[in-house]
Each structure stands twice: as structure tokens, then as C-alpha cells.
Image (cartoon, coloured by chain):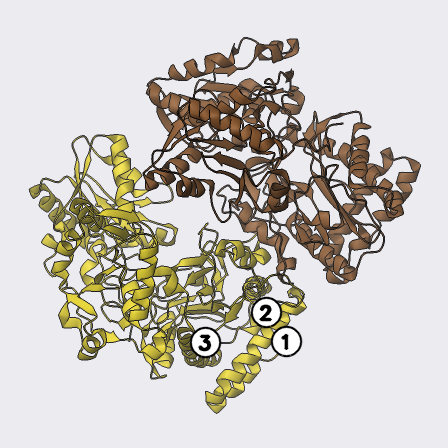
Chain colours: A brown, B yellow
Amino acid sequence: MFQEFEVLTDPRNGPIRLAALRKELNDRGLTGFLVPHSDEHQCEYLPAKAERLSWLTGFTASAGSAAVLEDKAGVFYDGRYTLQVRQQVDEKAFTPVFITDTRPEEWLAASVKKGDRIGFDPWLHTAVEIERFRKALAEKGIAELVAVDTNPIDAVWPDQPEAPLGEIIPHPSELAGLSSEQKRLQIGEILEGKGEDAVVLTLPDSIAWLLNIRGSDLPHTPFPLSFAILTKEGRLDLFVDERKLTTSARGHLGNAINIRTPEEFAPALADLKDQVVHLDPNTAAERIRMALDSAGADIVKGRDPCLLPKACKNPAELEGMRTAHVRDGGAVSKFLHFMANEAAKGELDEITAAKKLEDFRIASGALKDLSFDTISGAGPHGAMPHYRVNTDSNRPIKSGELYLVDSGGQYADGTTDITRTIAVGEPTDEMRDRFTRVLKGHIALAMARFPAGTRGCHLDLLARQPLWEAGLDFDHGTGHGVGAHLSVHEGPQNISKGLVDVALKEGMICSNEPGFYKEGEYGIRIENLIIVTPAIAIDGGDRPMHGFETITLAPIDLNLVDKSLMTDAEVDWLNTYHARIFETLAPDADADTKVWLEEVTRAI
Amino acid sequence: MFQEFEVLTDPRNGPIRLAALRKELNDRGLTGFLVPHSDEHQCEYLPAKAERLSWLTGFTASAGSAAVLEDKAGVFYDGRYTLQVRQQVDEKAFTPVFITDTRPEEWLAASVKKGDRIGFDPWLHTAVEIERFRKALAEKGIAELVAVDTNPIDAVWPDQPEAPLGEIIPHPSELAGLSSEQKRLQIGEILEGKGEDAVVLTLPDSIAWLLNIRGSDLPHTPFPLSFAILTKEGRLDLFVDERKLTTSARGHLGNAINIRTPEEFAPALADLKDQVVHLDPNTAAERIRMALDSAGADIVKGRDPCLLPKACKNPAELEGMRTAHVRDGGAVSKFLHFMANEAAKGELDEITAAKKLEDFRIASGALKDLSFDTISGAGPHGAMPHYRVNTDSNRPIKSGELYLVDSGGQYADGTTDITRTIAVGEPTDEMRDRFTRVLKGHIALAMARFPAGTRGCHLDLLARQPLWEAGLDFDHGTGHGVGAHLSVHEGPQNISKGLVDVALKEGMICSNEPGFYKEGEYGIRIENLIIVTPAIAIDGGDRPMHGFETITLAPIDLNLVDKSLMTDAEVDWLNTYHARIFETLAPDADADTKVWLEEVTRAI
């Protein structure tokens, strides 16, 4: 299995561990410490070694942080974790703080005493983040931030896991589409064009993309943890534990890449004295900025130059993604068939369903990992957009309820991310109305035409308008970028209300996932991945238009569709999509599934 | 008449005046000078005294600038003025530079010689603008920017007009809705809440709004030119030529306002030593920033705090705007009736039509001014979104063509801005197709529902989607803010592709003006003003939704509408809108107009 459902933390550990940390801080002359949920690379998933927040506080949210002072400690959470934080932390030791009301830096500035020395581990915070804390404390003017050399939590965590040593393997060039050398020269040219000598790369997926390698240090994200320095000439130093390198990876990297130890990274930064060095202050560790600064490098702040080329998939990557989605769509369809037969019997629960879905993906023979922990939500659990089932929360799947499943797979040729919502038994009219509005939004985005320069926030409305008309909305983004056998969430583009100044370009892949959530009752989300198509001329038009190609293939539950709410064009889209699913998946389906598939993809 | 159609500049003056300026610069030890199209207040319309760009170069664009060096001079223009710049300037003296390719600061940095001293008048540039020039020259490192005390163009412009002395009158409180004192205390509280002591106000419409006064220094924009300093306690110093103050204005301002001479403004800035002073770097003159800086004030950069409260009209302002639009709609409808009878005869031209429209507005007895120079474009002239007719360009209005007219009035109770496009004779199928798509976009925006927090850029797509579907678009914003008997273009909100981070709030007024332009053939634009309505609950919804109330009232040409392209909901909107026009305007229309009005507002 690629996911666990056990409850792994216990609020009773918090007070003891907090006391140990405070003693350690006192020994070091510190009165406080910042505890982010992050590693040196700002990864979405952390190695076990970096799970300091949950070790200390018990809080296992994917986003959150803590700040420890002598007499109080705040644990910062967002709207997704309102209930969870109170279940997981001991409130006598930690004060839950809702970040929408109080930002961590505001809480800190309001809580410090005169003379406080607040430590932070500069490897775990970005430069931008520390700048915010510094500013808040400077305005207060009574306490200071102190960068520590070693993390004090590590000093009091006796059984802290070791850094992972996952194998590094080459990513085949027929899937990558471009050689690493081509990519390095391309990024080198970007640096050259801006008058920059080098870039320090800290994001593991940028490095994996650039070198055409994949790794297994982390759950769900197939890249190795490493740092790199790339020069404008395309020369690259890779700082990585050599034990991770397979023979094939060594051969693949060859002599072009200078492989160095992680310990050599900090000295290598000092060697960039007098160079013009590009650094992404939103993703690079403050420690790196400090090192470049004290080395006398001329730091140019800007977005990681790999992000945009990585986001715009080339034809080989797109073909791999399409193939992965046919395979994944087959597995998901088998699961939906299974659910259609079994769910209404009342013998399944959220965990057995998630495991069953994983089994179907494993049976494809090509699954490397899930692309994230499956969101398997029955009834009211579906109304929590980021619900993660565990043995405590596990709920039976009952007739008369909706079941929402958001999941994805990592395959060598691509990464998938799909959400389907199904009616177990007979849905209510309201459920059908809401589902159809979500579907109309999904279809509007899928059918969109738009000129060059259009940002995701310009299109976001398409996915919401049918809900807005009824006084409804959903409180998450409509779409995130997706990597090609890389991270299931990647930038720089997205489709949301956020004013992200990145145009949607040919080859970018986004999710299309409008939803609707009725607290305490049910949740609905329909998610497919879509590729930005080339801008093509339209008959009679005066400028070419981009569009989207939907690559996710699994039936949408017609039991939840109210055709009377749909336009002819929307019905056409749905029928065409379903016909394509049948045509693509039926040849490889078993006889039983084929019969079912024909029924559920029928034209309406 | 409130507008002129004469050609007032002559390219032949350019070389002589340029030589005189260069001599003056040389006498002052300068090798160059920046010539913006602006005054001390960054107004859209300039007093004649500030028309230095057109005096020097002949170029009369509403946006543009020049940079003079010893051996060359660049005149910077945007896409609207590609033809005009070449007609108006002598290219032997001035090089037209297209700003989309080369920004003025880039041109300057690429053109300067070692040791160049480039003068600029710090009263005419914003702090942000000068920062850009400084940065570009600093990177080059061979030339410097020098702020001048007096403008060298003024020294060589013998018959330069005097500063205007337009009368200042009170704006009645029944139209303003709030007293000046209430407004001053409101803005004072905003300052207090941010820990600021005072704000320097430089935008004449902010000051006119804050003090409930109106003026007549400039064409089309009913505010006096002045500066003001407001403290957090709500005390205000107004720096204005006392000769402009009518007795009623003196009485209105009373003792609460400290009236001081314009000459006292600079010393008053020096008095802000050690104060925390709010300044808007995007609109305030660099000279003011310099004065505050050298006085030792603590400058906090931020948006003019009057902009948002001014943009959110109160009920009295909204009622005035509605009344003004009924009056203005009556005048425009009479004009459209006149055009329906006369245009196809072929005896009208763009100027006679514009004058006729102005006459109908004047006949209302309430017109204070036009709100901008009328855009009166026949046939291919309609394809230039900002076309401004003069005696040289004037074109007959011919059958078989489209005629586009974009115009507005200033009334004591409100400001209007309306565009209608009419078919003269029989339109082609393509014209009807394009017009209907523009209309569909217009209606989609007019009918929109949206939750709190929605920005204009989120809704912009609505106005474009029917064009995008056909491979078409228009290259201007969809909507701008409009003042209440103030500027016809005001911020901070807009509806466009630009990522403007300002939510649409109750009471804001925007234009809704999608268009389509076929170069060399015809232009289409349909413009109404819309008010953001309060967020109201929708039956069955879970959150309140804003919408728009359309206040502009004049028929949309049904000869150009292809009903087969429209949805039922769109047809309903159009029929309801037309019924409302008839109901509102018919009672005051003469018998002839009433018959016509009934015909052109018929349900389709």
C-alpha cells in the first residue's frame, strides 16, 4: 500500500516534548523558536525526519506551523483544520491560532516580551517568510530573530528518523522529450539573457526535471532531495548523497554533471563571491540567501527559471500523460463499477473503498506510487474538501448519501489526479441540482476558448458561474498545475480567484475541479486534468485561440445529472466525452465492466 | 459648444521650438529634458498652460511623452496613435517611438552619452515614474537625472497661457450625501488606524469629493486644481488660488478649512518634519516626495485613501446618477431618432453629428459640460476605439456603414458615458453577427451575479466570451470607474484583463463597454454604466450575491441584432431593458419621438 490510515500522533506527547524543547532553548540562550511544517526544499510532502511540527505538537496538517515562547506556544491552522487541530493538540500546552484572523508573525509580535530572542532554523524558512517575521518584530522593536546553526528540536528528538536514501534513477529520454543537456543550455540562456552568472536551484522537482532523473525520498513525489547550482554556460553541480545514485543514474548523469556531497553545498555558495546569482526568494531557504549575501554575491531575486519550461510540457511529456490517463482511467472505471455494484449494500467504508481503488491501480502493473493520499469521503465527510480518512474518522458508505473520491497515481509516463462523486442509492433533487451546476462549470472550463495572454484567474469564473447564479460557490481554487511524473501540485500557473500573473501557455496541464460543499451533509467535486492546446485559427476569426484538451477518462455519474438544467452544447460535451471514454476503455475492459461502461457512458 | 474640432498644432513649429529648448537647456548646464503629458496633479485633461508636449512637438495625444537630448528627441506613443503621431510631428526633428517595443526609460538609457545631465520637472512626474527612469539610467551608469526648479519649456514659450482661475462652487449636500466633515473624519480615521499622522492629497477629484466642492479649471472634469493636507484629526489645509473661490464656496468651506495660497504648499510640506505622512507614489508628484523626504517626514507609500470611499457611491450620489442618466438618455434618444431619420440621406458628417448630439444635451437645460470629447466615428473611423474627429479627419456618414458614437455629459447630479453603434442603411450579415456577439457580452456582464471579493478581472471574460468563441476579441478594457459629477474615468476598480486587486463593492459605478473593431471597415461598441448592487440572498443559496444595475437608458439598434444567436435569457434582458427605456423616456418625449421610441424598443 502507498498510504496509511493509522492515527500516528497523540496529543499527550505534546507537553513533555514542549518542556524538553524549552529547556534546550534555554540552554542556548533563546526564549522562543519557530516550528514550520517544511524541509530544506519547501516540499509539499516531507521526509519523516522533517516532521518536526507533528512530532512536537501532534498536529498533522499538510499546512500549519507553531511558535514556541517561554510561557505560551501557538499552533497556526487554516479553515481546513478547525476541528482537527483541537483533536490533535493538547490545548493546555498549545493555543490553536486561526491564521485568517492572526498571521503567525502578528501573533509573535503581539506575544513577545522585551529582550526575547526567537530562534529559527534558516534552512526551513524561505527568505520571503523570514522577511515578514523580521518586519513584524522590527515594528514591535523589543525582540530579535536569531538564526540557529542546528535545529534544537533535533537535539531533543531521540528517535528522529534519518534523512531518506531513496534510489535515483534516470527518467527515460523518450518520456522526457528533451535531453538534460538541452534543458541546461535552455535555462543557461535565460540566465545569460538577464545578465546572471548562475542560479541556485532548491526545488527538487526543478532539479529532477532539469537532469531527467527521478527519485524516491518522499511519499507520492518521485524526486530525490538535492540542491544544484547551474551556470549560464549550462554547467551543473549537483549536491546529493552519493548512496542514492544507482549505477544507471551515474551513467545517465555522466561527466557533464559535477556530483558533490550535501556538505559541500554551503561552501559552494561561498564560492559564488562577486557573481550575479539568481535566487527564488519564495522557495529558497533563508540560509542560502544568508550564505550568498555574506559571500558577497550579487543576488537577483526572481522565480526559479525552471518553473515555466517545466510547466509547458513538450509533445513527449504530453503523450506520456495521455497514456498514463488511459491506464489510470481504466483502473478508476473498474473501481466505479465495483462501487456501483457494492456500495449500496452498506458493507464498505471510506478506508476499504480507498484500498480497493489503490488495488485497481496496482493491478495495472505500472503504478509507482499514489500521487497523494486518497480523499475518500462519505456523506458529510465529502463536504471537507481536503478530508483525509484515518481509523478514527472512518465512516461507512451508506445508501442515500454521496461518496466523493479524489485520488491519483504516479506512473513512469505521467501523474494523474481525478475526482468523482457518486450517488449511493437514490440522490435527492437538491443533490442533482448542485451536481449539475458543478458539472456545467466543469464543462464551461473544458470548452473554453481564449487568446494568448489569458491568465487562470480570467477563466476561473467559468467554473463558478452556474453556482453563483444560485447563490452558491466553492471555497478553493478551480485548478492547479500538474507535473509529468513529478509533483501533483506544481506552479507557476493556476486557475483560481488569485491574481496570479502567469499566462496559460500551450502544453501546460491544470486540474479542472469545481465543487460544492454543504457542511454536515455532502460534498461534490468533478475533477479532470486538462492540457492547454496550441492557439489555432478559428474560421472567420482574427486571432488564434487556445483551448483545453481533457485527458482524464472515467465516467461522470449520470444518476446525478439533471439534463433539464443543461444547454444543448453542454449535453453534447458530456455525450462526446462519455463516448470517448467507452471507445478508449472498452477494448481493454473485461466483459462485465464493458457492459457496465456502455450503460454509464450512454448518451443522454 | 464644449468641444472643438479645429486642428490646433502644426508640425512645422516643432524644429524651431526644439532648438529654443535646447539652447535653454544648454544655458542651464543640461543636455536633455523629459517632456511628459501631465500637470502637477496627473489629471486626464490638462490646463492649456500644461500642454507642453503638444506645444513642443505638435503631438496632441491624450497619452504620450517626449525626451529631448542634444542630438535626438524621441516622441513616445501607443497603439492608438500610430498614424496620428506621424501626421503631427516633424520626423526630421522627432523620432516616433512605439512604447510597446521601447519604454521611454529604455530609449533614454540606450540613447544617453557619457556625462549627460537629463533634466526633469519634478512637479510633472510621479515618484514611481521617476524611480523607473532613475533605475534605467543607474544601470547604464553614465548619465544622471537632474530635478529642475523651474520648467525650461516655460522659459521659451512666449505666449504660454496662465494657470486657470475657474470658479469654485459648493456641491450641494443633497447630492453629495455626506457632509465634508463626515468625509474628513472618515478619512482621518483610516489614517489613525494605520498609525499615520497626515496625508498629502494631490488628486483634484479626491479633494473635490472630500470638500464637496466643484470647479471649472479644466475641460470636462468639474474640479478645481488644488493641493491639500489632511490630518488624522480631520483638519484640512487647502492650497488654492483664492480668486477662484466664490462667496458661496467661502461660506461652504467656512472656518473648518484652512485656506492657504499655492505658494504656501511647499513650505507646509517642510512642516511635516517627523510626522508619519501618507503619500500615493503612483499619483503624487516626485517634487512632493522630495520635499517630504528632505523635511525628514516618515513617508508611508499607499493608495490615496479617498479613492475607495469616493468610488463607493452613497444612496444620494446613486440617486443623482440615475436622474442624470434619465435626462441624458432622453437627449441621446432624441439624437438617435434624428440619426434614424437623417443619416441615410448622406448629408451628415462626424462633426455635424457630434454637434447635433451636444445640442440635444444642451437643450436639457442642465448640461454643465461634456464629460469628454465626443468620439464620432463613421465607417472605418469607428474601428479606432479612441478616434477623435477634427476638421482634417472629418468623414461623411454614409449608407451601408456603421456609425459609432461614444459621448457623455456632466450634470450637477451626475456624469454620463454612453456608446451606441447604429447601422446607417442596411448592415451586412457579418456586422449583425459581430454586433450580436458584442451585445451578448454586454448582457452577460449586465446580468452577472458574483460574491463579495470578486475583482473586475474575474468578470471581464463575460464581456468577451461570445467573441472568443469566434476567434475575436477587443483590445481595450471592458469597464472603467465613473465619478458622480467628477471624472468620467476614475479608479481604483476597473473591469479588464489587468490584474487590479480591488474588489467590486456596493455602490461602485463602472462602464460596461465591450466592442469589436475591424480595421479599415467598421467599429462596434455598446456602452452602458452599471452600479454594483448590494449583495443579496438568493433563494436556496448559501451566500449573498452582488449584481449590476444598468442606469444608462437609450435604445440598442435592433437592426443590428441577430436574434438567432441569442439565448432566451439574453432576449429577455434586451426586451426588459427596452421596455424600461420606453416606460421611462416616453412620458417626456415629443409625439414623434414617442412613436419612434415605441418602434425601436419593441420586444423581439
Q: Callout 2, which amino acid?
A: Val
Alpha carbon separation for disc pair 3 and 1:
24 Å
Say if A275 sits above or below B579 in the image.
Answer: above
Alpha carbon separation for disc pair 2 and 3:
19 Å
- Residue placed at 28% from the left, 62% from the top? B45
Q: Residue at the far bottom: name it.
A: B591
Expressed as whole percent of the image width and height from the top left, the position of residue B392 reads 31, 64
Q: Which residue is mark 2?
A: B561
Mark 2: secondary structure? loop
Q: Which residue is mark 1?
A: B604
Q: Callout 1, which amino acid?
A: Ile
Expressed as whole percent of the image width and height from the top left, the position of residue A288 reads 43, 23
- Describe residue B136's horizontal placement relative to residue A174 as left or right: left
Mark 1: secondary structure? loop
Q: Quadrant of the C terminus of chain A?
A: bottom right
Q: Residues within 10 Å of mark 3 (few under 14, many from 20)?
A: many
- Describe residue A279's horizontal placement relative to residue B295 as left or right: right
Q: Nearer the viewer, residue A106 or A174?
A: A106
Q: Residues within 10 Å of mark 2 (few under 14, many from 20)?
A: many
Q: Callout 3, which amino acid?
A: Ala
Residue A185 visible from this viewpoint: yes
Which of label 2 and label 3 is nearer to you?
A: 2
Alpha carbon separation for disc pair 2 and 1:
9 Å
Expressed as whole percent of the image width and height from the top left, the position of residue B190 reads 34, 58
Q: Of callouts 3 and 1, which one flags the residue occurring earlier in the amino acid sequence?
A: 3
Q: Of callouts 2 and 1, which one flags the residue occurring earlier in the amino acid sequence?
A: 2
Q: Which residue is mark 3?
A: B343
Residue A542 visible from this viewpoint: no
Q: Are marks 2 and 1 in contact (CB under 8 Å)?
A: yes
